[in-house]
Image (spheres, rainbow, N blue to C red):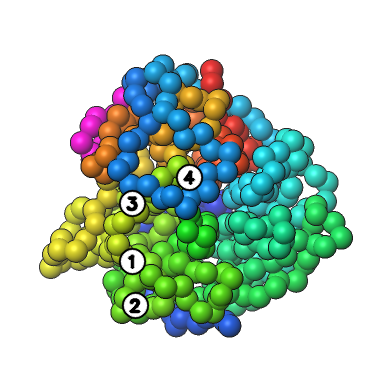
Amino acid sequence: MTFRALLLAGFALWALACGDDTGSGGAASTSSTSTGSSVTSSTSVSSSSASTSATSTSSSSSSSASTGGANCDAAEPTPEGLQLVPFTTDIPLPIAMAPHPTNPSRLFIAERNGVIHVVDDGVVLPTPFLDLSDVVYCCDEDRGFLDLEFHPDYENNGLFYVHYTELGSPVDSTSILAEYRRSTSDPDVADPAPVRVLISLEQDTVWHYGGTITFGPDGMLYYSRGDGGGAGDPENDAQNPLNQYGKVMRIDVDTFPTPPPGNMPGADPFVWDMGLRNVWRMSFDRCNGDLYLGDVGQNSIEEISVHRPGDGHLNYGWHMYEGSSCFDPPCDPTGMTMPIIELDHQGGFCAVIGGYVYRGDLLSGHRGRYFYGDICSKRIRSFLLSPSGTATDLVDHSQDLETANTLGDYTFGSFGQDLNGELYVLDMEGVVYRIEPD
């Protein structure tokens, strides 16, 4: 079997393990250095193009949010048909994408083995931006390179951040959040040595590292960390506010290790939200600051939740609840935030992939819709968020996009978004697609 085949096989195992791991271990110590059509919502899912609708009219807003090149106008009245168009086939194992913070023609795409590429005007540069394959454990179960993000002032300071599982750590399972810097002599490559490791989290299982690192509208780095694995979160880490497992953390990279003010009271100083199982992908709406989280479920339910500006600190319920269903009784919903979308495993779903609110120009009829997907079913769907915070106008785009015949089995790894708000789909079979009008 070739190395690439081994990686894809590992990714298939990861997809299955994400939704129903059988490990018995729990998270270890924390250390900081320095459904078919089965969907629970208020609205049924349409399989046709989205009905005529305007962008989400969220009552929340964030005046400090940087929209970059995002288009915050209302959607056009007639939504376009959609298609997946190959953007590049020159990156073998794409798992994460990040735009240059100020240059719309430049993207950075990372492979699961830790090799990060520069894509300039659609062309993959021959020399990798950074090759971390000698420190990244790749790639069975959940382990591998997880995400990258660029400092808002990257143009001047050259700083960016990576999240991966560390080769040579206990069971190759320590997750690393590290800071790197662009080379001062060549903007197309990074210095190979890290500036510093921000957070190192050990665990004795090989599941549930979370994934996303993303800067919010307040300039803080938000970091989704899984519960550390073990079926059902046996150590109840997600409900323990004093550790960093099963949490969204909020970090001021400019003052670290000093935590920023405003994090969850009475908790680990970097905890923002809690009660999560394994948020693989989360993202902010660049026009209003809403935070959308795709939390991979255990036995039965995949979840999409939303944290809106002004909500305070939220507890999403795991492991007391899986979705809105009691998982570990006795269950008390007091103080719990339930998901706005639930995807039933009986409908073929197994591991939700959180996406983005579309804020581009190519698909003006879909502007304001949140797109998300699922690894096993290969479905791509979207909805609008109502002013009251419910999911409305649910649409399944899978037939339109021909995802069943286009995407590989268990290789649909992530969504991407460029500086102008256009959406991409990353397939671990070696194709990055852009969603374009048909």
Residue situated in front as seen by the camera: 177 or 14? 177
Q: Which residue is mark 3?
A: 308
The residue lying at 54 percent from left, 27 percent from top is: 361
Tell me if residue 349 is in the magenta stretch: no
Question: What is the CA distance from the residue labelled 1 to the residue labelled 3?
Answer: 15 Å
The residue lying at 56 percent from left, 58 percent from top is: 146
**Tag 3: amino acid:** Arg
Question: Badges 1 and 3: C-beta atoms under 8 Å apart?
Answer: no
Residue situated in front as seen by the camera: 59 or 432? 59
Q: Which residue is mark 1?
A: 274
Question: Residue 16 at x, y = what percent?
Answer: 43, 52
Disc 1 is placed on an element classified as strand
Q: Which mark is residue 286?
A: 4
Question: Badges 2 and 1: C-beta atoms under 8 Å apart?
Answer: yes
| Segment colored magenta | 37-47
**Tag 1: amino acid:** Met
Q: Identify the mark nearer the N-term, 1 or 3.
A: 1
Left or right of 300, for residue 219: right
Q: Identify the mark nearer the N-term, 3 or 2.
A: 2
The residue lying at 36 percent from left, 27 percent from top is: 54
Disc 2 is placed on an element classified as loop
Q: Which residue is mark 2?
A: 267
Question: What is the CA distance from the residue labelled 3 to the residue labelled 2?
Answer: 20 Å
**Tag 2: amino acid:** Ala
Magenta stretch, overall SS: loop
